[in-house]
Amino acid sequence: MSCYRDARYGFELDYPVDWRMSTPGLFARSWDLLTGSGCVMTLRGPDMRHLNLVAGPQIATHSMETFRAEFTGYANRRWGRAAPAFESLSIDGVEHFAAVYETPLGFAKKYSVVTPRRVELAFTALLSVRNSEASRAGLERREAEYDAIVCSVRYSGGRHGTVR
């Protein structure tokens, strides 16, 4: 495994050695300037796998109920799709949130992890591409790989997390 470390926000995460970290492009640098988020990156893996990350100060405290309501409204307004499926993640005994939803490109998963320093890590993973030949087992393997990367987030010597 390779490791990404962000000293500014005090977290690190592991990712497979056959993945690479992309350099932020013009859009990402512009987004950073507009939002004040200090970390915008994409991890790219084989077979069109990618995991986007935006990190920055947490704007509001979330509960699972508010995350569900806000994200369901967002998915409905943005894509007019059915309600997302929600999960909770546990990292160092703290609950975080995830949602699987349908986009025009296929299915995606959004993760929201908040560190003890009140930094929100928002991950987005593409699970499937519309009209692809991917089997359900292939989708489950992709999702498990993304879950493992997100649950590897550590801060101040923390333990790895799990998805439920």
Image (cartoon, helix red, strand yellow):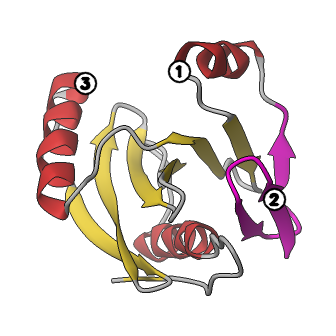
The amino acid beneath tag 3 is: Arg
Q: Which residues are magenta?
A: 1-23
Where does the C terminus fall, quadrant-wise? bottom left
Give the percent coordinates (x, y) of residue 61.
Answer: 28, 51
Q: Is residue 27 above or below residue 155?
A: above
Q: Nearer the viewer, residue 95 or 51?
A: 95
Q: Which residue position holds label 3?
A: 78
The amino acid beneath tag 1 is: Thr
Give the percent coordinates (x, y) of residue 107.
Answer: 38, 49
Callout 3 crowding tier (Cα within 10 Å): few <14, some 14–19, many ≥20: few
Q: Which residue position holds label 2?
A: 5
| 2 inside magenta stretch | yes
For label 1, the SS is helix
Callout 2 crowding tier (Cα within 10 Å): few <14, some 14–19, many ≥20: some
- Distance of mark 1 from mark 2, alpha carbons? 21 Å
Q: Which residue position holds label 1?
A: 35
Instruction: Of the two numbered discs 3 and 1 on the same chain, state the one appearing first in sequence.
Output: 1
Quadrant in which residue 4 is drawn: bottom right
Judge depth for marks 2 and 3 and give the one in front: 2
Q: Is residue 3 left or right of residue 67?
A: right
Q: Is residue 97 above or below residue 25?
A: below
